[in-house]
């Protein structure tokens, strides 16, 4: 049972480049979410999904896109990377939004 | 907008001492409150979840209380051990979202 798997673990981008952070879970969870964690701040919600085909914005959605074509996968796309998007990104899943969330180990992203 | 605050930001105690971690939130219309542990370079691990109708929840040496009307929760860790050294975060849920505090980093000295 792999839980929540995030790839890549580390990535360096140049300003203006685009990329996709991958997130997959094998627990058949309906609710999935993406957060960013910056020093001295709590996790901030970027986007979330309550099931396949349904996504919505969180607290800091600008510059990011998501889609949920399957229950298992919830990729996060950076459209045109900016230095302000340098952060650690976490993906999480849970059976429903009110149940304990399972987190991946994160993707550490640096944008030069 | 929900604001979640954790004070202090860091805490250092000798082994065996009881730990008291505080969490406060501004909007009492929450569905539940969760406490998480985060080890360096790792993701978050859920420790306890308290429903809004509950006053406390216990798991082993961990006990969490919730006073929704005053917007406060406290995590107690009894007889701390060096292995308890980590960052502890609280999060409140409402409207399909979790709002996190910045965390308290705990160091337990052997």
Image: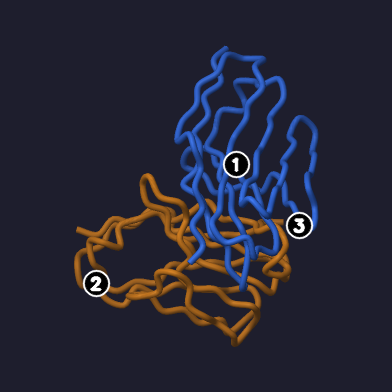
Q: Is residue B97 above or below residue B40?
A: below
Say which residue label 2 marks. Answer: A17
Which image quarter is the C terminus of chain A in?
Answer: bottom left
Name the residue carrying label 3: B51
Q: Chain of mark 3?
A: B
Mark 2 Cα shell of 10 Å, populated few (<14), some (14-19), many (≥20): few
The chosen color scheme is by chain
Q: Is residue A93 left or right of residue A96?
A: left
Element under label 2? loop
In three-dimensional space, the C-alpha distance between marks 2 and 3, rounded to whole angstroms, equals 43 Å
Kindly check if marks 2 and 1 are in contact, taking CB atoms under 8 A apart as contact: no
Going by the picture, which residue comes out furthest to the front? B70
Using the numbered discs, state the Cα–Cα distance from disc 2 to disc 1 in whole angstroms. Answer: 33 Å
Judge depth for marks 2 and 1 and give the one in front.
Answer: 1
Q: Secondary structure at mark 3?
A: strand
Same chain for labels 2 and 3? Say yes or no. Answer: no
Q: Residue at x 19, y 67 (%)?
A: A15
Q: Label 3, label 1: how many angstroms apart (C-alpha)?
A: 18 Å
* Chain letter, blue in picture: B
- What residue is shown with label 1? B37
Colour used to depict chain A in the structure image: orange
Where in the figure is residue A84, as x and y percent of width and height? Answer: 26, 61
Residue at the image position 71 percent from the left and 70 percent from the top: A96
Residue B106 in the image, given as x and y percentages of width and height: 53, 29
Q: Is residue A92 above or below residue B61?
A: below
Q: Chain of mark 1?
A: B
Residue mark closest to the camera, 2 vs 3: 3
Say which quadrant the N terminus of chain A sits in.
Answer: bottom right
């Amino acid at each position: 049972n792999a839980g929540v798997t995030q790839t890549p673990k580390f990535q360096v981008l140049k300003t203006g480049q685009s990329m996709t952070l991958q997130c997959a879970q094998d627990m058949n969870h309906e609710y999935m979410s993406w957060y960013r964690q910056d020093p001295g701040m709590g996790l901030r919600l970027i986007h979330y999904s309550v099931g396949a085909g349904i996504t919505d914005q969180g607290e800091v959605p600008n510059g990011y896109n998501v889609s949920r074509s399957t229950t298992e996968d919830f990729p996060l796309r950076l459209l045109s990377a900016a230095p302000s998007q340098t952060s650690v990104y976490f993906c999480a899943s849970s059976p429903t939004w009110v149940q304990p969330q399972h987190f991946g180990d994160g993707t550490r992203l640096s944008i030069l | 907008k929900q604001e979640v605050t954790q004070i202090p930001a860091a805490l250092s105690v000798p082994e065996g001492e009881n730990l008291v971690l505080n969490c406060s939130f501004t909007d009492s219309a929450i569905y539940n409150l969760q406490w998480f542990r985060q080890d360096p370079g790792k993701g978050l691990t859920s420790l306890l979840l308290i429903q809004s109708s509950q006053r406390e929840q216990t798991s082993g040496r961990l006990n969490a209380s919730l006073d929704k009307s005053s917007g406060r929760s406290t995590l107690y860790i009894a007889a701390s051990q060096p292995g308890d050294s980590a960052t502890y975060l609280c999060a409140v849920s409402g409207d399909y979202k979790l709002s996190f505090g910045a965390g308290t980093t705990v160091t337990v000295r052997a």
